[in-house]
Image (cartoon, helix red, strand yellow):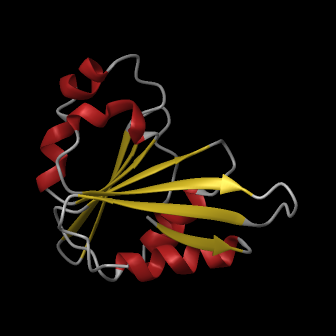
Amino acid sequence: MYNFISKCEEDTKSFAYNLASKLDNGDLIILSGDLGSGKTKFTEGFLSYFGLEDEISSPTFTIVNEYNKNNINIFHFDVYRLNSIDEFYAIGGQDYFSKGICIIEWGEQILEALPNNYIHISFNRDFKNDNYRNLNITIHGNKYKNLF
């Protein structure tokens, strides 16, 4: 497990920007954490690497937002509203994994659908300082073992 302490929104966005520079189609990131913990700021920073920071919108009601830049597809999921993993399968969720970079908020709800290799980032607030976030990064599979 790896740890990153974000002291402000810009730290979170910068961390995401740097991670985006290392990923390509077929990569998968799972984001977990309470509402307001930084998942959307992370995604904003990630998309900024591709010049898409002004394009971000929450996929809460659409389940997935699709972005494309320079032959890279980015799929931003929010699976919080799914009632079961069967709904993820019904929308063809697994088909997205090989078609681009996937960022899945609340991905812990669909663990059994995930491939062997993915990055899981858990966002935790620091209750002593409102702006701080502790990002716990867990690597699943061997693909990302040298990334951090």
Does residue 76 sit above or below 147 in this rendering?
above
- Please tell me which residue is depicted at 46% across the width and 79% down the height of the picture: 17
* Residue 145 in view, yes or no: yes
- Please tell me which residue is depicted at 51% across the width and 52% down the height of the picture: 57
* Residue 78 in view, yes or no: no
Q: Position of residue 77 (x, y in %)?
A: 38, 44
Does residue 48 sit above or below 137 in this rendering?
below
Left or right of residue 98: residue 46: right
**Image quarter hosting the C terminus:** bottom left
Return the residue nearer the eye: 98 or 135: 135
Q: Position of residue 46 (x, y in %)?
A: 44, 71
Q: How many marks?
A: 0
Left or right of residue 136: residue 64: left
Please identify the quarter of the rendering in which residue 109 is found. top left
Does residue 73 sit above or below 51 in this rendering?
above
Q: Looking at the image, which residue sits at the far front?
A: 1
Q: Position of residue 72 (x, y in %)?
A: 21, 70
Left or right of residue 117: residue 19: right
Please identify the quarter of the rendering in which residue 21 is found. bottom left
Return the residue nearer the eye: 120 or 74: 120
**Image quarter hosting the N terminus:** bottom left
Return the residue nearer the eye: 93 or 85: 85
Does residue 116 sit above or below 71 in this rendering?
above
Q: Position of residue 29 (x, y in %)?
A: 35, 57
Left or right of residue 56: residue 23: left
Please identify the quarter of the rendering in which residue 145 is found. bottom left
